[in-house]
Amino acid sequence: MVIVKDERMSRKRTYLMCPPERFTVAYAINPWMDTSAPVDAELALKQWQLLRETLTGLGHTVHVLPAEDGLPDMVYAANGAFTVDRTAFGARFRYPQRALEADAHRAFYAEQGWAYVEPTEINEGEGDFAYLPEAYGGMILAGHGFRTEAVAHSHAQEALGRPVISLQLVDPRFYHLDVALAALDDKTITYYPGAFSAGSQRVLAQLFPDALVADEADALAFGLNLVSDGRNVVLNAEATGLAAKLASAGYLPVPVELSELKKGGGSVKCCVAELRP
Ligand code: ARG
């Protein structure tokens, strides 16, 4: 008898990305950034283009937000807003160096005719918010501790009308939720428990008993900073350990090289905002 493994199902996605045309490490606002380490701008752009082509090659739509002068971190498009139910919950950045990025994202959503919620507290968009449309009928997971203020979580819950589960990040290397946890499909997550407080670890274990649990090496390789369509999981090529775990869970890992963008403290997911209609 042949035992057929469950086929993971992909769903077509729409993403927003911004090319690293102005990318440099000009300041250090996370432990990965070293202003004395050189960045190969040409390689950064090539790697980014390959990431975009990987996503379009999987059948997804990618919108491109033009890079702007003086905003070297704008390539990390995930931080510009968080979208659910065709509503964009706008970002308000913690550090002044990135503040103006929020305006570029706001203009994009206005032009596309999306509802836009003005932020009243600091929150770094999809960097600290994840959405699981089929977990408990549609649930938002939200991080605080380094960038996003916990009070922004309750604002998001009121504005978006979806339950928001607040999770506390405790390890400065994993300063955004999206470097510690990712949605693999509409109801399944993968995460590194050590990035979270003891209480938040218990909450995650209770809500997601079937989660794929990652280890510190997976997280340090930026493996959790992934983009999944439910079947294909695009992740940093260094994260070979996590790729193997994903494969044995029935997903298709799609490794991409993003060495240059890692110098800014980000990888695949940081570069990709999902637009949820
Ligand atoms: N240099 C950027 C910062 O520190 C990196 C942002 C990474 N983005 C993310 N979604 N984790 O703000």
Image (spheres, grey):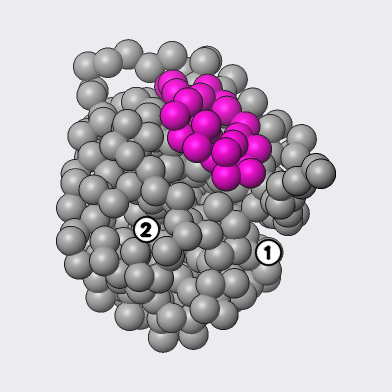
Provide residue 147's location: percent of width, then percent of height.
25, 56
| Residue at 52 percent of width and 31 percent of height | 244
Residue identified by numbered label 2: 128
Instruction: Tell me where residue 112 sits by quadrant.
Output: bottom right
Q: Nearer the viewer, residue 47 or 138?
A: 138
| Residue at 60 percent of width and 57 percent of height | 185
| Residue at 40 percent of width and 70 percent of height | 207
* Residue 112 image label: 1
Q: Is mark 2 within 8 Å of ligand 1?
A: yes
Q: Secondary structure at mark 2?
A: loop
Mark positioned earlier in the residue sequence (2 or 1): 1
Tag 2 and tag 1, C-beta contact below 8 Å: no
Quadrant of the drawing holding the N terminus: top right
Single out the residue that lies furthest toward the right. Answer: 1
Q: Residues within 10 Å of mark 2 (few under 14, many from 20)?
A: many
Instruction: Tell me where residue 250 sits by quadrant.
Output: top right
Q: Amino acid under label 1? A: Gln
Left-right relation of 18 to 168:
right
